[in-house]
Amino acid sequence: NKANFVLYLRPIDLPKNELTRDELIRQISAVLDNSIQIKAVSAIDSFENKEVELISDSPSFYEIKELIATVKLGSLESYQPLFIRDNIDYDKAMLISLKLNKWPGVFLTNKIRREYLSDSEGSPIISGVESLSHILGYTGKINDSELEKMGSKYSLIDYVGKIGIEYSWETELKGEAGRKNIEVDALGRQKKIINEVLAQDGFNLMLAIDLDLQAKAEEVTKTYLEKNKFKRASVIIMDPQTGEVRALVSLPAYNNNSFAAGISQEEYDKFLNDPNRPLFNRSISGEFPSGSTIKPIFAAGALQEGIINEKTSFLSNGGLRIGEWFFPDWKAGGHGVTDVRKAIALSVNTFFYYIGG
């Protein structure tokens, strides 16, 4: 997880003079919109001790002004923190924190958002497991419909699982938010804590995925794609004794941090317009012909229903003709006399034509 700095304003505490209030908003928006450049300690010191001089107002200035204008001064809402921005990076958060004692009505809090480990270039930090993105999925800011569905345990600034494990196990992974009831004075300032419930961590989740096997499966798949000049592939490896999925690869994959940190419309459109559909998990969502993987299921069903037994045999002579239609075996001339064991071992089409027909 990674620190997620969140900025709030409490309208009742903002300067009452409009010019003074606008100047405060200008300085806040200057930090949010990179209208000032801070690259050294001396620059931070300068920011702490001086007012910021701007040539023109940045986009956030107007957004914040419009947001504040929706709150009637003196109303109950004016005493409540007004959400301004989250996902504020560390450097900007430090700049804002330096000014908090001089910026009335400005609050900076620290929430947590998911960060998936990656190297300096954005690639997964564990080499060869890019495809984990399709397994893990990602989190993103909750939307209105999700908030309505999930109920009072969530707020508009929460992040929730959108897809993959993050989505399927959202309730277990989230935990319980803390809460605090406080007594305030007429100016909305805290006087004392009435009661407090501490936050509770969510559960840890252990997957059946074998990381080494996942990495090897992805490596082999990528080699196959490159060799055959293909772009898309899917691999699933399961334990036949337990049914556990030990590896699940869908290529191409994507960097789930792009979504966890908040993706721009431009970046998202690139994913949507990519003909190879990197967001599509072929392993669980693709619809493909079953091929011969269905044969053991047919065999098990026929044995269970008494259609055949372990000694039932058919002659495989290269195929089966029905009227003008000919259904071939994969081996010219056929496999000869074939029972169920041989049919499964050699994938004998003719045997399954008979028991399925």
Image: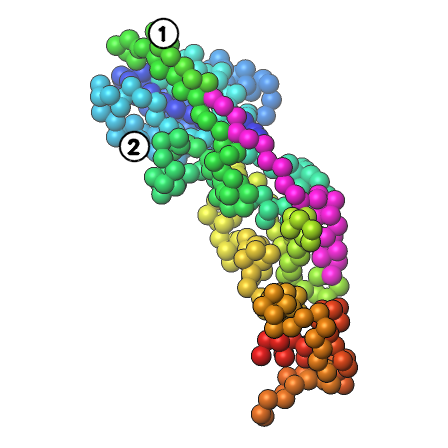
Q: Which residues are magenta?
A: 199-224
Residue 145 visible to the viewer: yes
Circle 1 sits on which residue?
192
Q: Residue at x 46, y 27 (%)?
A: 176
**Where residue 80 sits: x, y (%)?**
31, 21
Residue located farthest toward the bottom when viewing the structure as drawn: 324
Quadrant for the N terminus, please. top right
The three-letter amino acid code for the residue at tag 1 is Lys
Q: Nearer the viewer, residue 64 or 56?
A: 64
Which is more N-terminal, label 2 or label 1? 2
Give the vertical position of 233 relative to 180 (above or below): below
**Nearer the observer, disc 1 or disc 2?**
1
Badge 2 element: helix
Can residue 202 be found in the magenta stretch? yes
Q: Which residue occupies 70% across, 80% down?
A: 314
Q: Which mark is residue 66?
A: 2
The number of discs equals: 2
Give the alpha-carbon distance from disc 1 to disc 2, as whole Å. Answer: 33 Å
| Quarter of the image where one finds residue 125 | top right
Q: Is residue 19 left or right of residue 98?
A: left
Identify residue type, mark 2.
Answer: Glu
Which x, y percent locates residue 282?
A: 58, 58
Q: Is residue 349 above or below residue 178?
A: below
